[in-house]
Image (cartoon, rainbow, N blue to C red):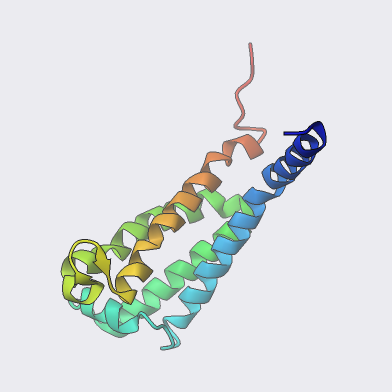
């Protein structure tokens, strides 16, 4: 690599390092607020999947609670003092999003175990959301001077 290209590469990497955390946090917040708001409004494309997975509770209660939970996560991701709470709520919720893979395999797969249906793909993408939460969480202490270790 030429010195000029190496310099450009370092500058782009430095820019990404500086801004990727915030961009990831904001985009994750946007996803949770948007998808969360759809649930109590009866506009969520995953409404039937949720109703069939959590069939032992009244669907309107499940959709309302889940929607509020997701909006709360989104707001917490936007408001830095609530970031730890938002990440905790996110990590509590996301394992439950994989339940349809177990409870409703006939809907999530067209060929078990790798032939995911559209619903199955929608669920598996949550692995990325978990990864994004870990990336955001990995920097929480670094951004808080009170939590940084001091050298003695």
Describe residue 104's horizontal placement relative to residue 32 as left or right.
left
Q: Residue furthest front?
A: 2
Q: Is residue 150 above or below residue 50?
A: above
Q: Residue at x 39, y 79 (%)?
A: 64
Q: Residue at x 58, y 40 (%)?
A: 139
**Quarter of the image where one finds residue 54:** bottom left
Q: Residue furthest bottom?
A: 42
Q: Residue furthest right?
A: 4
* Residue 22: % across, % down: 66, 53
Describe residue 41's horizontal placement relative to residue 82 as left or right.
left
**Quarter of the image where one finds residue 15:** top right
Q: Quadrant of the C terminus?
A: top right
Q: 4 or 28, which is in the foreground?
A: 4
Q: 29 or 23, which is in the foreground?
A: 23
* Residue 52: % across, % down: 22, 79
Q: Is residue 24 above or below residue 57?
A: above
Q: Residue at x 28, y 62 (%)?
A: 98
Describe residue 117's horizontal placement relative to residue 39 as left or right.
left
* Residue 82: % across, % down: 56, 54
Q: Residue furthest top?
A: 152
* Residue 34: % across, % down: 53, 75
Q: How many marks?
A: 0
Q: 25 or 20, which is in the foreground?
A: 20
| Residue 54 appears in view | no
| Residue 6 appears in view | yes
Q: Quadrant of the N terminus?
A: top right
Q: Residue at x 44, y 87 (%)?
A: 43
Describe residue 151's horizontal placement relative to residue 44 as left or right.
right
Q: 48 or 142, which is in the foreground?
A: 48
């Amino acid at each position: 690599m030429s010195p000029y290209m190496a310099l450009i590469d370092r500058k782009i990497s430095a820019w990404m390092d500086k801004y990727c955390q915030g961009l990831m946090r904001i985009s994750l917040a946007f996803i949770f607020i948007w998808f969360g708001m759809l649930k109590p409004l009866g506009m969520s494309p995953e409404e039937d999947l949720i109703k069939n997975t959590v069939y032992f509770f009244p669907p309107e209660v499940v959709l309302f609670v889940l929607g509020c939970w997701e909006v709360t996560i989104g707001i917490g991701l936007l408001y830095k003092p609530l970031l730890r709470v938002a990440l905790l709520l996110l990590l509590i919720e996301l394992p439950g999003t994989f339940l349809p893979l177990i409870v409703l395999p006939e809907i999530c797969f067209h060929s078990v175990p790798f032939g995911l249906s559209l619903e199955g793909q929608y669920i598996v993408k949550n692995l990325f959301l978990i990864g994004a939460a870990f990336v955001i969480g990995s920097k929480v202490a670094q951004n808080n001077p009170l939590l940084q270790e001091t050298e003695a």
